Image (cartoon, grey):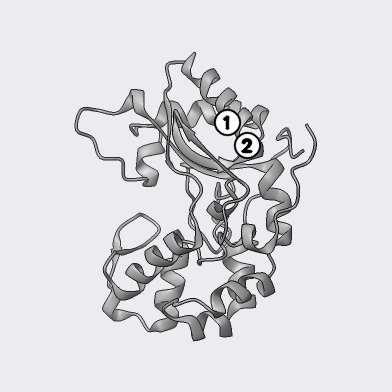
Amino acid sequence: MLAAPMLDALQLTGRTRTHIAQLDSPRVALHVDAVADFLALREAARKSGIEIAVFSGFRDFESQLALWNRKFRGERPLLDADGLPVDHASLDEAGIVDHILRWTALPGASRHHWGSELDLYDVAALPEDYRVQLVPAEYALTGVFAHLAGWLADNAAGFGFFRPYAAFLGGVYPEPWHWSYAPVSVPALAALTPAVIAEAVTTSDLLGKENVLGRLVELHRTYVSAVNPPPQGVRVT
């Protein structure tokens, strides 16, 4: 497969969806170059009794901004490493920004803007009336999605997918549900500089904008570039 074309600044920051394909079955929006490999991954998993569904795929800038601002205002909880709520009122502005970024990307800097990122769960494993939470316990050895997690760990690399948040590197907490399509995400990450993010954020209604822009190089280093690279065996082109 040829390397994916480089995303431009608007595509990198989620301000357009010209690089995105919308699928109806399963219902998901993702990068056009990721479609074939994702569908092949899903079909292979089905043969092992797993019905892969996507909790979240492409997310545009405005959707990420709305999520960020709700968390900044305390309308949605800030969580610790175990997924437990943190006291919003006890944090200063910098603390709120950092706690948001542990689990939720800065608008303009979300990997979901690229269409290469998929938050996955297994429909076949869902108990009746179960509400998917996307917390680490669901993907642990005794979790509801343990079979999915193990199967992906053994097979996803062959389809070009890897976990960018497999281990804690000081920024984003591990996300066992989050899988990335390397042929798109590897060059996209290299292109997403602090300057590209700043251009998108500056004209937005982001809460905490001055704090974010004043610390953007640091935040980029900690929460954007500090990810686990594709392990050996993952196809990146």
Q: Is residue 172 left or right of residue 84?
A: right
Judge whether residue 29 can be spotted in this image: yes
- Provide residue 192's location: percent of width, then percent of height: 68, 63
187 versus 36 height, above or below = below
- Provide residue 61's location: percent of width, then percent of height: 50, 62
Q: Quick one: which residue is furthest to the right in this view? A: 2
The answer to whether the residue labelled 2 contacts the one labelled 1, judged by CB atoms less than 8 Å apart, is: yes
- Provide residue 224's location: percent of width, then percent of height: 60, 63
Query: Residue 67 versus residue 176: which sits nearer the camera?
Result: 67
Quadrant for residue 221, please give it: bottom right
Instruction: Name the element at disc 2.
Output: helix
- Provide residue 170's location: percent of width, then percent of height: 55, 63
Q: Is residue 83 left or right of residue 232?
A: left
Give me the residue at 44% from left, 30% from top.
26
Q: Is residue 29 left or right of residue 226?
A: left
Judge whether residue 230 can be spotted in this image: no
Give me the residue at 42% from left, 23% from top.
51
Residue that numbered label 1 is attached to: 38
Q: Amino acid at mark 1?
A: Phe
The N terminus sits in image quarter: top right
The C terminus sits in image quarter: top right
Give me the residue at 39% from left, 45% from top.
136
Residue that numbered label 2 is attached to: 34
Can you tell which mark lies on residue 235?
A: none
Quadrant for residue 154, please give it: top right
Query: Residue 189 versus residue 25: which sits nearer the camera?
Result: 25
Q: Quick one: which residue is furthest to the top in this view? A: 47
Dot 2, how many residues are within 10 Å of its Cα: few (below 14), some (14-19), or many (20+)?
A: many
